[in-house]
Image: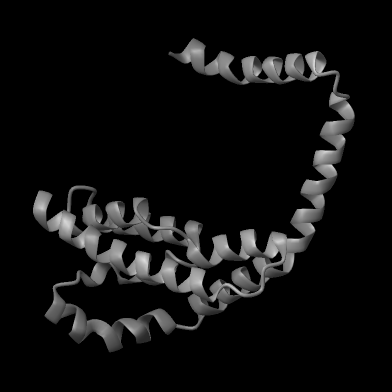
Amino acid sequence: MDIFSAALVPFLVLIILLYGYIKNVDIYSSFVEGAKEGLKTSLKIMPYLIAIFVSIGIFKSSKAMDMLLYVFSPIMKIVGFPEEIFPLVILRPISGSGALAVVKSIIEDYGPDSYPGRVASIMAGSSETIFYTMAVYFGSIGIKDHRHTLKAALISYISSIFASIFISNIFF
């Protein structure tokens, strides 16, 4: 299997080169043109990415997470929502790397086979970084009106939170 994995990328490059040769395409010019387009796209989405990263930094350093946990703690106890995963619920739609750091922290603190560890793992695997993804994709093509997408994404995210808890309760 390791030999197959190591040979896959060079094989795909060879297939692309052969296809370009057969179709009589100037491969180098096409590659350079694609690189130019990629750079243009990167420059288009840069303001959106900077805004997200600055917002995440402000949120992390402001103790807002502790305040939110304090406010929502009574509700979470009534519903049966594990408090340990609350930081993951808040960060996952905003930052993939921040969410992975929270999952790592939960697993280190409680263990991978603990209830919070399992819920966090399922939640991280079944949800998306909504705001980051929308900023990148909508920003790259210039879409300004994204209200229906955001509503649908947030509804699916909330569903994934409860589904993660429900699945963890059923199987673990």
Say left or right for 30 vs 154: right
Say left or right for 5 vs 109: right
Residue at 24% x, 58% y: name it.
164
Task: Tell me if I can see residue 172 in this picture.
Answer: no
Q: Nearer the viewer, residue 17 or 125?
A: 17
Task: Tell me if I can see residue 50 in this picture.
Answer: yes
x, y percent for residue 10: 65, 17
Residue situated furthest front in the rendering: 23
Residue at 24% x, 54% y: name it.
117
| Res 23 → quadrant | top right
Residue at 53% x, 76% y: name it.
147
x, y percent for residue 127: 38, 57
| Res 170 → quadrant | bottom left
x, y percent for residue 132: 56, 63
Q: Nearer the viewer, residue 157 or 51?
A: 157
| Quadrant of the rendering where the N terminus is positioned | top left
| Res 124 → quadrant | bottom left
x, y percent for residue 52: 60, 70
Q: Is residue 115 above or below residue 52?
A: above
Residue at 29% x, 89% y: name it.
71
